[in-house]
Image (cartoon, rainbow, N blue to C red):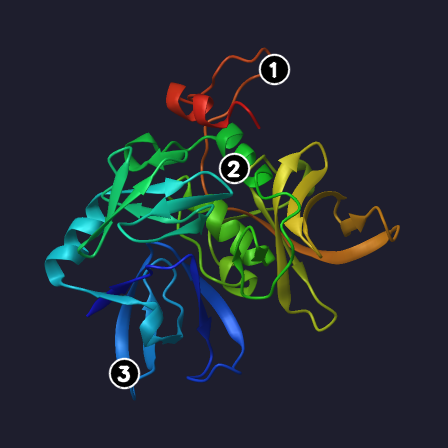
Amino acid sequence: MFAVCPLSQVPVRVQSKDASEMVSQVLFGEMVEVLEKRGKNWLKIRCTWDNLVGWCRSNQLKILTPAEREIAQEDWARALDLCQPVMGENHHFPVPFGSVLPQYDGMRLKIGDEFFTFNGQALMKSDLRKDTEFLVKIAKRLLFAPELSGGRSPFGIDSAGLMQVIFGFVGKSLPRTAAEQVFTGEDVDFVEQSRVGDLAFFEDKKGIIAHVGLILGEGLLIHCNGMVKTDRFDHFGVFDGNSRRYAFKLRVIKRVFTFTEKDNTGNEIQGDLNTEQEKLLSYH
């Protein structure tokens, strides 16, 4: 049995109680597999994009029929606005950046048996492109989003959630935590060999991978530390300009995806932003 999120965002908790730790969020339009029901109020779910298992309130998810699930899986788009309302027949509410828009035709989408109107910017599934310039522009849209452990939206996000959301726009699924994401892709031996789009992983004082950032090139990366921001990094780690010290110790750099790039003259090497992507992101 599968369900979809019909609300802006829904917390995923460790245990079936409201006081339990939030380990992730399900954004509008995202589907989960229902593994177990507990009483009238709770569902044990598996997030289909990263296999994370946790608990959601049953009244915050909408159960799908097999036919609805199949259609929604095949045809979707992603919301590009940081926050934009969807309008139903009798209500409307905001959906955050990165939300899934099932069966979106440029104006309307469908959640279960209910239709909504969405007038914001959206990236259609057919427009997905593995491009570093596009990935960086997507990442920068989340600058200044506040840090929130377990968060995956512009209203609160953590470092691994940031990577999950931005890589979702280029069709790449990542695990939920930095400790899991580090096993994705291939090692990059030296910082000098890193490329735009690589992931840098950092360890805590116990040597546990606890932080991740996206390499932007020229000694910069974007990550979430208090807020989503850019900082300088090197083979020692991330240098925090405010505290004037290294905030995170570098452990390893991983190449999780192969992207198209440009040469020094601006000519494409393997490809560039397509027209629709450039139009959608040109104002940033």
- Of labels 3 and 1, earlier in sequence is 3
Kindly identify which numbered label has been placed on residue 264: 1
Q: Quadrant of residue 101 in the image?
A: top left
Q: Residue at x 29, y 49 (%)?
A: 88
* 272 and 92: which is toward the camera: 92
- Cα distance in 3D space between marks 1 and 2: 22 Å
Please name the residue that numbered disc 3 is placed on: 37
| Kind of residue sitting beneath label 2 | Ile
In the picture, which quadrant includes the N terminus?
A: bottom left
Residue that label 2 marks? 138
Spatial CA distance of label 3 from label 2 is: 37 Å
Q: What residue is rendered at 33% in x and 69% in y? A: 46
**Is residue 216 at least partly visible in the picture?**
yes
SS at circle 2: helix
Residue located 44% across and 47% down the image = 98
- Residue at 57% across / 28% down in the picture? 284
Q: Is residue 233 left or right of residue 67?
A: right
Q: Position of residue 282 (x, y in %)?
A: 52, 23
The mark lying in front, picked from 1 and 2, is: 2
Three-letter residue code for mark 1: Asn
| In the depicted structure, whether residue 246 falls above or below residue 263 | below
Label 2 CA crowd tier, 10 Å (few <14, some 14–19, many 20+): many
Number of the label disc, if any, that sits on residue 239: none
Q: Work out whether residue 256 can be spotted.
A: no
